[in-house]
Image (spheres, helix red, strand yellow):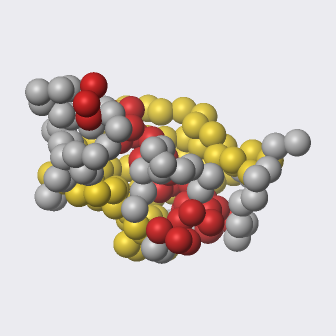
Amino acid sequence: MDINEILQYLPHRYPFLLVDRVVEMEEGKRVVALKNVTMNEPFFPGHFPHHPVMPGVLIIEAMAQAAALLSFKSSGVKPDENSVVYFAGIDNVRFKRPVVPGDQLMMELEITQAKRNIYKYKGVARVDGQIATEGELMCAVKTLS
């Protein structure tokens, strides 16, 4: 999926869209997506001015956005303004190395459980093949009224 298709499936927009491309997708199973991390990210001036590091919560958010793409594509649903994917849980997250400007964050998530509109994933984010972050996510697909 290129950025134009991603924009059809995620409601996020700048500065909060954190997936640039989907490299691989096996619907119902797994997704591999990437985020190019640049010095132009709006959080770097404050985190940290002399040693810019991508906040861990934003790495997890990027992984969740990739998971949302997998959920929507797997369910055959193209979301509209009444659809959203919410976090329902985050477990066993570990941060192994900092993510800095110039890095390409490669995120791989696999569905470990899917019941109705609740999905559980196991995910890992790597930079240059090294694990930056890993953990388990749970997300819920909701229809707004």
Side of 143 relative to 119 (left or right): right
Could one spot residue 131 in this view of the protein? no
Side of 136 relative to 43 (left or right): right
Q: Is residue 101 above or below residue 1?
A: above
Side of 32 relative to 72 (left or right): left
Give percent across and percent down for residue 42. 35, 38
Q: Residue at x 59, y 56 (%)?
A: 10
Q: Which quadrant is the C terminus positioned in?
A: top right
Side of 62 relative to 50 (left or right): right
Which residue occupies the foreground of this view, 6 or 117?
6
Q: Residue at x 40, y 62 (%)?
A: 20
Q: Is residue 142 above or below residue 73?
A: above
Total labels: the figure holds 0
Which residue occupies the foreground of this view, 11 or 59?
11
Q: Residue at x 64, y 46 (%)?
A: 85
Which residue occupies the foreground of this view, 45 or 81?
45
Q: Is residue 25 above or below residue 16?
A: below
Which residue occupies the foreground of this view, 28 or 83?
83
Give percent across and percent down for residue 57. 38, 32
Q: Residue furthest right?
A: 145
Find residue 100 and report its image quarter.
top left
Could one spot residue 103 in this view of the protein? yes
Q: Residue at x 28, y 46 (%)?
A: 40
Q: Residue furthest left?
A: 50
Give percent across and percent down for residue 71. 60, 59
Find residue 104 and report its image quarter.
bottom left
Give percent across and percent down for residue 8. 62, 66
